[in-house]
């Protein structure tokens, strides 16, 4: 084992300090390399979690030595993986009275043990948010999950989960928003509600409706209200028409009066003397000068 490590260090040093052009190994060096056996990663699968701590499966196959290499000699291993520790906000809706579990680590806890992480929970009551200033400490009976049994309406809000590893490094932060509905207001059983929608008689089997569903007083009141609204609209339209007619008549009378005074002024200007015309042009006409003499 020590010899193989020495050869690996030697190869690493050769690659770092070798010139730019490639060099060919000697036969003796190749024989020494063939004696070294190690494991290499032949395949690596994606991480099981897009955010937070997850698991990745890898296939290891032996290489080197004089033994025959085949797929049966390969082995699989599972390691931890972390793409990003920040997870977004996820919401879910449940009915009051049900059992609800909010799991923070899921399969990672089962694979690596309960005491490999430090989990803390915080809670923002009655609001769906990711603002960290609105959260307060929440005591969870279980380490990796919050169990709400039975679920109550005051349990609605946002739950935040923080996960640290044994080195106190944050490996996950998750937000889960919970909306709680009352069973009397809304049912989340789609199949049952679909049957009631297709056959409404099944929902109310003992209730039958005969005759007019509205009482006579309600119909009479609705008719009176409709007639009153129609009469008010007709009266308003009539008043608008009368006002328009009066305005048109006033405008036509003022127009005729202006045309008559203009004609008298023009006639007096034509019959007057040059001195009178000049005085009239300067707005000093003698009174009664514009009257036409017979």
Image (tube, grey):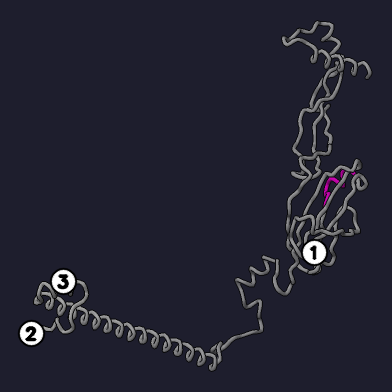
Q: CA distance from mark 2 to mark 3?
A: 20 Å
Q: Nearer the viewer, residue 5 or 17?
A: 17
Please give the residue where the numbered disc 3 appears in the rendered image. Answer: 278
Q: Is residue 114 magenta?
A: no
3 or 1: mark nearer the eye: 3
Q: x, y (%) of residue 15? A: 79, 14
Asked whether the residues under the numbered discs 2 and 1 touch, taking CB atoms below 8 Å apart as contact, a structural biologist would say: no
Please give the residue where the numbered disc 2 appears in the rendered image. Answer: 293
Classify 252 as above or below 68. below
Image disc number at residue 125 = 1
Residue depicted at x 61% and y 85%: 208
Q: CA distance from mark 2 to mark 1?
A: 102 Å
Q: CA distance from mark 3 to mark 1?
A: 95 Å
Q: x, y (%) of residue 199? A: 61, 74
In the rendered structure, the answer to whether residue 72 lies left or right of residue 283 reads right
Asked whether the residues under the numbered discs 3 and 1 touch, taking CB atoms below 8 Å apart as contact, a structural biologist would say: no
For marks 3 and 1, the one nearer the N-term is 1
Q: x, y (%) of residue 136? A: 84, 59
Q: Residues within 10 Å of mark 3 (few under 14, many from 20)?
A: some
């Amino acid at each position: 084992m020590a010899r193989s490590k020495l050869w690996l260090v030697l190869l690493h040093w050769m690659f770092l300090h070798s010139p730019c052009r490639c060099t060919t190994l000697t036969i003796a060096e190749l024989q020494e390399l063939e004696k070294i056996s190690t494991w290499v990663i032949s395949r690596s699968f994606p991480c099981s979690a897009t955010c937070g701590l997850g698991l990745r499966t890898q296939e290891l196959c032996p290489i080197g030595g004089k033994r025959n290499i085949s797929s049966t000699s390969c082995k699989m291993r599972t390691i931890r993986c972390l793409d990003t520790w920040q997870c977004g906000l996820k919401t879910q809706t449940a009915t009051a009275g049900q059992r609800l579990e909010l799991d923070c680590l899921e399969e990672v806890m089962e694979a690596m043990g309960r005491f490999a992480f430090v989990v803390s929970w915080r809670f923002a009551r009655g609001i769906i948010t990711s603002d960290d200033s609105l959260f307060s400490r929440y005591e969870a009976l279980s380490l990796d999950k919050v169990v709400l049994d039975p679920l109550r309406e005051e349990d609605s809000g946002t739950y935040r989960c923080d996960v640290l590893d044994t080195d106190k490094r944050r490996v996950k932060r998750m937000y889960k928003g919970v909306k709680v509905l009352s069973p009397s207001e809304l049912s989340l059983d789609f199949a049952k509600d679909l049957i009631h929608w297709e056959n409404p008689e099944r929902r109310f089997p003992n209730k039958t409706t005969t005759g007019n569903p509205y009482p006579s007083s309600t119909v009479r009141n609705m008719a009176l209200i409709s007639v009153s609204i129609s009469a008010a609209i007709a009266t308003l339209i009539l008043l608008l028409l009368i006002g328009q007619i009066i305005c048109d008549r006033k405008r036509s009378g003022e127009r005729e009066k202006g045309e008559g005074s203009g004609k008298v002024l023009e006639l007096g200007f034509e019959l007057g003397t040059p001195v009178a015309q000049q005085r009239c042009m300067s707005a000093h006409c003698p009174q009664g000068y514009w009257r036409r003499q017979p």
